[in-house]
Amino acid sequence: MRLTIVGGGGFRVPLVYRALFAGPFAGLVRELVLYDVDAGRLAAIEAALAALAQQGTHGQGPQGHGPQGAGPQVRTASSLAEALDGTDMVFAAIRPGGTAGRISDERIALELGLLGQETTGAGGISYALRSIPPMLRLAEEMRNRCPGAWLLNFTNPAGMVTEALVPVLGRRVIGICDSASGLVHRAARAAGVTLPAGGLDGVGYYGLNHLGWLYRLKSGGRDALPGLLANPAALAGFEEGRLFPPEFLADLRCLPNEYLFYYYDTARALAGMRGADLTRGESIARQQAELYPRLASAGPDAFALWEAARRSREEGYLAEARTPGEHRDESDLAGGGYERVALAAMRALSGGGPTDLILNTVNTVAGSAVPAVPGLPADAVVEVPCAVTSDGAVPLPQDPPGPEQLTLMRRVKEVERFVVEAVTTGRREAALAAFARHPLVDSEVLAAELLTGYEAAFPELGSLWHIGP
């Protein structure tokens, strides 16, 4: 199989390459094609992969989980057309505007007293307005050059971007995120539940990307979730359990995705962000400005440099949600979520056998117009457990959400659809409505200030809006 990564200079690409050397995904890909608009970043990541491949020829890689054999052949493409011709699978993880754009997404919101985060709230809307147009161009190019290929979308906000692409690619586009599956596996460990390999039997999860809840965790016919929610010591043993007060979780009767911290404890999140010396984007920009030039010239040390930077980056993830001195779990620092969800989906889509995964796809149960998540539109993209085969990813039916969860999901889905409308129709009013309706903004006055600020930071947004009648 040929796998093309659009955004091949992205920081996480070595995770995908490493996973293709050994274990369940070894031999799955014969050729890995990298395409990126930033030649310097592409060269740096290519150097890290070369160093990793060199380690693979000598056996075990770094930290006990490196390559153990020959991985796929790697080549770079100088044009998108070259990257897509003849490919079987496309991973897309692009960031229009780069880390400088992320900083603006964060800072413009923070300066207005709003939460500044790249996928949630005002910053997520700004990011989507920039990321959807090039992703639509990618989808159109795929339809022309590799119509049989699948697109696994990592570009954030993943659910919103995926929804924008469905009219072009239908079910051949699937959104990928590891936060939901990470929650399920961490909760299962804490509850003493063993999940079946490749299965999610007994798992109940519904939501949108970065806005979901684990509401059932059955094992042997017994739901272990109520016992976990009633056990503060067990909750303290994993990240999502520590994010929220035990009394709150007991009343909620489900476990929220970590990103719901921004909705349930907005004041604390905002205070953490405003009290930090650097925003998350500024921290990553500083790290990458120093790292990427070193990678390109580091030779056999390139992968070790990258790995050290990756662990440092993971340690700072969601730092505003942790108390001073609190460290992330070692299992999360080790990596292995993001790429394994994608490669497990790729293997099943390419005929390697069925599997169950939590993915972003259209909200309809197989062979019907019945929504997998009752109360949300059947044509909306949702994040739910799916049965994945060579025919695609089909959502598994979920219980009706609680009234508060459903109200929040409906409102955020309305926002997502305003954003897609703004990009695809050129209606600036739809972008204003998206900002105003988002629960973390909830103000027409602030919406106007946000959009004006983002237009000043990103002049390309102005080209989206149709002028005149």
Image: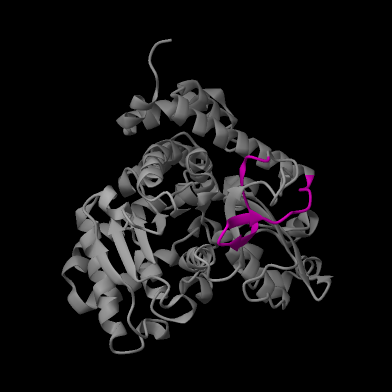
Q: In this view, does 268 lie to the left or right of 14?
A: right
- Please identify the residue farthest to the top as the structure is shown: 469
Residue 463, given in percent of the width and then of the height, sits at 33, 26
- Please identify the residue farthest to the left as the structure is shown: 297
Question: Is 269 covered by the magenta stretch?
Answer: no
Magenta residues?
A: 378-402
Q: In this view, does 321 lie to the left or right of 230?
A: left
Residue 207, given in percent of the width and then of the height, sits at 65, 50
- Residue 258 seen anywhere in this rendered image of the structure: no
**Residue positioned 33% across, 73% down in the render:** 72
Residue 150, given in percent of the width and then of the height, sits at 46, 54
* Colouring convention used in this rendered image of the protein: one colour
**Residue positioned 34% across, 77% down in the render:** 71
**Residue positioned 52% across, 52% down in the render:** 175
Q: Nearer the viewer, residue 400 or 455?
A: 400
Q: In this view, does 12 lie above or below 399?
A: below
Quarter of the image for the C terminus: give it.
top left
Q: Is residue 194 above or below residue 33?
A: below
Quarter of the image for the N terminus: give it.
bottom left
Q: Is residue 233 above or below residue 241?
A: below
